[in-house]
Image (cartoon, rainbow, N blue to C red):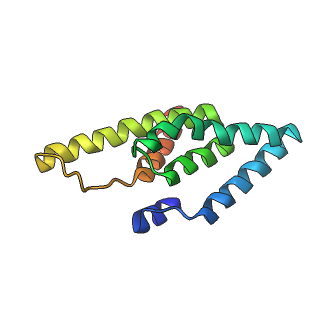
Amino acid sequence: MANLFDAREYKIPNELIILGYAAGLFLNIQNFQMIGVVLFIIKAILPVLILYLLYTLKGLGSGDIKLFSVMSTLVGFEYTTEVMITSVVLAGAAVLGLFLYEKGINLKRRLHYSFYMTAAFFLLQMIND
């Protein structure tokens, strides 16, 4: 769902992020009882702390960081880290492909990073099964 908003508006609505956080909180409380609230907060904050530097360097948008944060609350920080690394590799390959195809860099081109996050998530699902 976030991909659709990202593709159309280069923005992921906060309402969608809040729904994701609500699901993550519910899941953590269901699995870990009240300590799940603490785990939820830790899982939500870690990706933000790690990716903040990329945000300040304009390497990632705030919506991408919020998506990683929500993902971490739903599937765990370890798996989210794997998705982060894989999505960077996929996006890098896409940029290299565009560079070779277009014979140079178009600095005005913007990538929808959520596409690479989604591709990395499902690629890892296929590999890990």
Q: Which residue is drawn at 56% across and 65% down?
A: 13
Q: In the figure, residue 46 lies in which quadrant?
A: top right
Quadrant (top left, top right, bottom left, bottom right) of the C terminus? top right
Q: Residue at x 42, y 52 (%)?
A: 115
Task: Locate residue 76 relative to residue 56 in the image: left or right.
Answer: right
- Horizontal and vertical percent for residue 114? 45, 52
- What residue occupies the far left of the structure in this picture? 103
Residue drawn at (79%, 51%) of the image: 26
- Image x and y of residue 93, in percent: 29, 39
Left or right: 77 as drawn, with respect to 83: right
Q: State whether residue 65 is above or below residue 39.
A: below
Picture quadrant of residue 44: top right
Q: Can residue 92 be seen in this view?
A: yes
Which quadrant would residue 32 be assigned to in this image? top right
Q: Residue furthest right?
A: 34
Q: Which residue is drawn at 45% across and 61% down?
A: 6
Say whether residue 129 is visible: no
